[in-house]
Each structure stands twice: as C-alpha cells, then as structure tokens.
Image: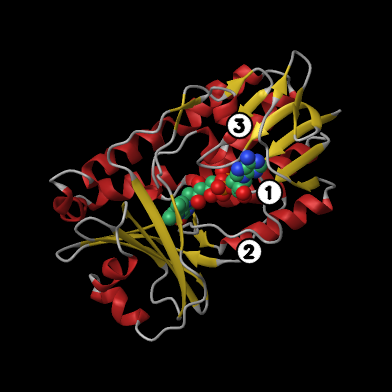
Amino acid sequence: MIDLLVAGGGPVGLAAAIAARLAGLDVTVLEPRSGTIDKACGEGLMPGALPLLARLGAYPVGHVIAGIGYRDATASIDHRFAGGHGLGVRRTVLHSTLAARADALGVVRVQGKLRSLEQNNESVSAAGIRARWLLGCDGLHSSVARLTGLALAAPLHGRRYGIRQHFMTAPWSDLVEVHYGSSTELYVTPVAADMVGIAMLGPQGASFDTAVAAVPAVADRLHGAETLSDRRGAGPFRQRTRGRVSGRVLLAGDASGYVDALTGEGLRLGFEQVHAAVASIVDGRPERYEREWRAITREPRMVTSGLVAWAGSPLRSGLVPAAARVPKFFGAVVERLAR
Ligand SMILES: Cc1cc2nc3c(=O)[nH]c(=O)nc-3n(C[C@H](O)[C@H](O)[C@H](O)COP(=O)(O)OP(=O)(O)OC[C@H]3O[C@@H](n4cnc5c(N)ncnc54)[C@H](O)[C@@H]3O)c2cc1C
C-alpha cells in the first residue's frame, strides 16, 4: 500500500505529488493523458503562485507580468503589482517543469483514468492501486468529487466557458490585458518573447473570432500573425462541491470547486490548497484541510462571484469605467487576488 494516490496529473496534481514526496510520502499520480499536457488557460501565474512553486523546487520559465490592465471602448485602468511580478507560462512548459521535478523526486506516474473508488477506515483503492489517502485533482469535471458524493449539481443559468489560442508576435505590453466586450472578455497574456496567448471568456457559443475582431487594439496586432496552437476550450466554469473531504479522500484544485477564470487565480489557489492538503494528510487530520480550504478560497470566491455577477448584469458596460474612477480600489482588489 502506498501513502498517497493523486488522481489527475495537471498542475495541481503534480504540485501535490511533489509536496507529498518532499514530505516523505510514497506517491503515485494517475493521469489518463500521455506526454506533455496542454489545456485551455489564460496562463497568467499571479505573483503569489511563484513562491508556492519555488517551495516545490519547480520554477517554470515564462514571461514577466508586471500587472493587470482592464480596458473597454471607453475607459482603461492599469495596476502594476506592488510586491513582485507574476509570470505568463505556457501550460506545456508548466507541465514539463512540474513533471520533471516529480520524476526526479521519485513520484510514480501511471497512465490511467479513475473510474471508481472504494474506501474503508484504513485505505482507498482506485484503478488497481491501494493507498492510505486519495487526493482528487482531476479538474473541473472531477470523477473523484462525483464518486464521493462531494460534487453538487452545477448551476444551469449563466454558464460561462473559455477558449484560448496562441499567436507568434512579440508581447506589446508587460501587463495581462483584459478587454471587456459586450458579452465576452479577451485576455492577452505574454508567455514568451515572441508569443502571446489569447483567452476568451464568455457564454456558450460565443465566437472567438468575433470577440477578437471587436477589439481593434488586439485584432490589429494579431493580423497576419502565425498561430502557434490549436484552439482549446473549457467549461462550464462554475462547479460546486458540498465539502472537500470524504473519509480518506480529499479534493484540490478545480476538482474542489471553481467559480470562474475572470480573475485568473485558479493555479495560485490550487497550489496553496495542495500545501494545506499534504500537511493535513501528513498529520492524519483531514478535517483541518476543510477549514484551511475555506480560509484559502473565501475571499477569492467572494470577489470572483461578485465580478461575474456584475459582468453578467445589465450594468456590465459600467464595469471598466467604474474601476477607472477608483484606481486605488481597483489596485487593492487586484493585490488581494494576486497574493
Ligand atoms: C480559459 C481559461 C483561462 C484561465 N486563465 C487562468 C489564468 O490566467 N491563471 C490561472 O491561475 N488560472 C487560469 N485558469 C484556471 C486554471 O486553468 C485552472 O485553475 C487549473 O488548470 C487547475 O488545475 P488542476 O490541476 O486542478 O486541473 P486541470 O488542469 O484541469 O488538470 C486536471 C487533470 O486531471 C486529469 N483527469 C481528468 N479526469 C480524470 C480521472 N477520472 N482520473 C485521473 N485523471 C483525470 C485530466 O486529464 C487533467 O490532466 C483558466 C481557465 C480557463 C478555462
């Protein structure tokens, strides 16, 4: 029997496996996909994510992000991070960095999908592997959350999705630019000296091409630029869980519940949860993780839910002008989310 089985070899699952190995646990990661894993993501690592990765000894190569700028046709507001920079990192680079570190530490990575699980007082079994603990890091549509009964039905109304693609062009800003359209947001993230990632967030069926064309400041720069990746989508974003712990099973990352990509702190939160989950597993006190998960996510969940509600309301067009009128408040909100 091993100490920990991690379901899902995305960034949060690999970070969990590394943290657990560093704490002296035997760890196996179960992931259905082979090779270097890509995923629809805005790819902005908030400043607070970087020390969490450094603690794991897995610091990826990326492009410095100095802050966040909100724009619409009538107003704009920029905030430069006060306490250190963020990093735009291709998901493939993030995956390779974390996977290499996990391999170097002796994490066992197995290709396979968790389809069922059984647990008793001493162990959890899934995919033919028996472990003292199971950590579900299997993303937005988590099988682990569903099989443990921790998943709640996702809301049917106001569903939002994301699509991303990369373009070969030198970044024109050291900020993540967020362009608010009438129903979609376009995120421009510098990820390399010659590459930007464009992520569109919006309702089901929103067109990436239409969203880009509606923002001349972006469309003009991308005109004629070579595409460096296929379009990939994800969603619906909002996923809810009733709790994060069921016996010997814990949830982290998107699997533990997700609000929206609007505020771009998903990876930072996932890495923070991982450190808390592993510490509570080492101490054999999973109930402590539930408390810490709530503390880690309370404020971001509140801010992101509020912004999503505003962005989905008839007052949407007032969001950027309102932020521009209160730059100190805007800056304070960004700083809270970036920590
Ligand atoms: C359009 C978009 C833009 C975003 N922008 C940002 C941003 O700029 N900054 C940021 O921090 N976050 C952003 N996010 C959020 C971020 O992408 C997620 O929070 C992050 O990927 C969560 O990582 P994870 O490891 O929990 O899940 P994932 O990255 O989804 O990884 C889950 C893994 O589990 C595997 N899996 C699935 N089912 C099973 C199973 N049954 N058994 C075993 N394995 C399984 C999958 O193959 C996958 O590899 C964005 C998201 C979207 C969609």
Asked if the beta carbon under badge 3 is closer than 8 A to the nearest atom of ligand 1, the reply is: yes
Separation of residues labelled 1 and 3 (CA atoms): 14 Å
Between circles 2 and 1, the one closer to the viewer is 1
- Pointer 2 residue: 93
Res 319 visible: yes
Mark 2 / mark 1, whichever is N-terminal = 1
Residue to which mark 3 is pinned: 144
Q: Earlier in the sequence, mark 2 or mark 3?
A: 2
**Dot 2, how many residues are within 10 Å of its Cα: few (below 14), some (14-19), or many (20+)?**
some
Q: Does the residue labelled 1 lie within 8 Å of ligand 1?
A: yes
Residue 210: x and y, percent? 27, 68
Task: Name the residue rendered at 51%, 66% in the picture.
Answer: 64
Q: Image quarter for residue 73?
A: bottom left
User: Of 336 and 195, which appears nearest the observer?
Assistant: 195
Q: Is mark 1 on a helix, strand or loop?
A: loop
| Measured Cα–Cα span from mark 2 to mark 3 | 26 Å
Q: Nearest the camera: 113 or 63?
A: 113
Residue at point 52%, 76% (across, down): 228
The residue wearing badge 1 is 32
Q: Which residue lies furthest to the bottom in this view?
A: 224
Q: Is residue 146 left or right of residue 200?
A: right
